């Protein structure tokens, strides 16, 4: 096996780099305008565990997946029910509600001033 080739790697030298580049061609990033309050809300829910796992293996925690699934059904015209089984931290819950409300309010205010949709409040 040549020195530049790893065990199990059938490509050689530069071909391997081209393959990796080809694998990422379908990946795209887009810039999204967010009101600063909405950005703060998103950062906070991520800090609290809205996503978990290692950098390349992030996922929604199992405890949130049924809520996301319920939201998808509602958005698709269905109905769902959510029950709070245990109250969350009495300081964090209103803080998150306030952050979300401020993010939506700030997004609407920016759009109103611009006269068109510059900021998207939808998360």
Image (cartoon, grey):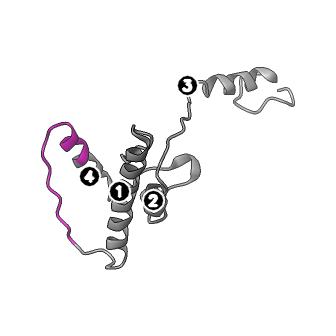
For the residues bearing labels 1 and 3, Cβ distance under 8 angstroms: no
Q: What span is colored magenta in the figure? A: 71-85
Residue 100 position, x and y percent, is 36, 60
Residue 12 position, x and y percent, is 79, 22
Q: How much space separates mark 4 and mark 3, taking CA atoms?
A: 29 Å
Q: Which of the 4 image quarters holds residue 2? A: top right
**Mark closer to the chain start, 2 or 3:** 3
The residue that mark 1 highlights is 105
Secondary element at tag 3: loop
For image coordinates 49% across by 56% down, the residue present is 36
Q: How much space separates mark 4 and mark 1, taking CA atoms?
A: 28 Å
Question: Against 34, is 31 above or below?
Answer: above
Residue 37: give its label. 2
**Mark closer to the chain start, 1 or 3:** 3
The residue that mark 4 highlights is 66
For the residues bearing labels 4 and 1, Cβ distance under 8 angstroms: no
Q: Nearer the viewer, residue 56 or 28?
A: 28
Q: Residue furthest bottom?
A: 90
Nearer the observer, disc 1 or disc 3? 1
The residue that mark 3 highlights is 26
For the residues bearing labels 1 and 2, Cβ distance under 8 angstroms: yes
Question: Against 99, is 59 above or below?
Answer: above
Q: How much space separates mark 2 and mark 4, taking CA atoms?
A: 27 Å
Neighbour class for label 1 at 10 Å: few (<14), some, many (≥20)?
some
Q: Which of the 4 image quarters holds residue 6? A: top right
Question: Against 93, is 59 above or below?
Answer: above
Left or right side of 93 for 19: right
Q: Nearer the viewer, residue 68 or 115?
A: 115
Neighbour class for label 4 at 10 Å: few (<14), some, many (≥20)?
few
Secondary element at tag 2: helix
Q: How much space separates mark 1 and mark 2, taking CA atoms?
A: 9 Å
**Mark closer to the chain start, 4 or 1:** 4
């Amino acid at each position: 096996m040549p020195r530049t080739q790893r065990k199990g790697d059938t490509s050689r030298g530069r071909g391997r780099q081209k393959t990796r580049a080809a694998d990422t061609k379908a990946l795209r990033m887009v810039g999204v305008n967010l009101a600063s309050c909405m950005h703060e809300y998103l950062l906070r829910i991520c800090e609290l565990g809205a996503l978990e796992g290692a950098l390349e293996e992030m996922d929604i925690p199992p405890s949130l997946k049924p809520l996301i699934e319920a939201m998808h059904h509602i958005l698709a015209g269905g109905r769902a029910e959510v029950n709070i089984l245990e109250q969350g931290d009495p300081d964090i819950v209103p803080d998150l509600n306030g952050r979300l409300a401020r993010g939506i309010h700030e997004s609407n205010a920016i759009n109103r001033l611009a006269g068109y949709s510059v900021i998207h409040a939808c998360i």
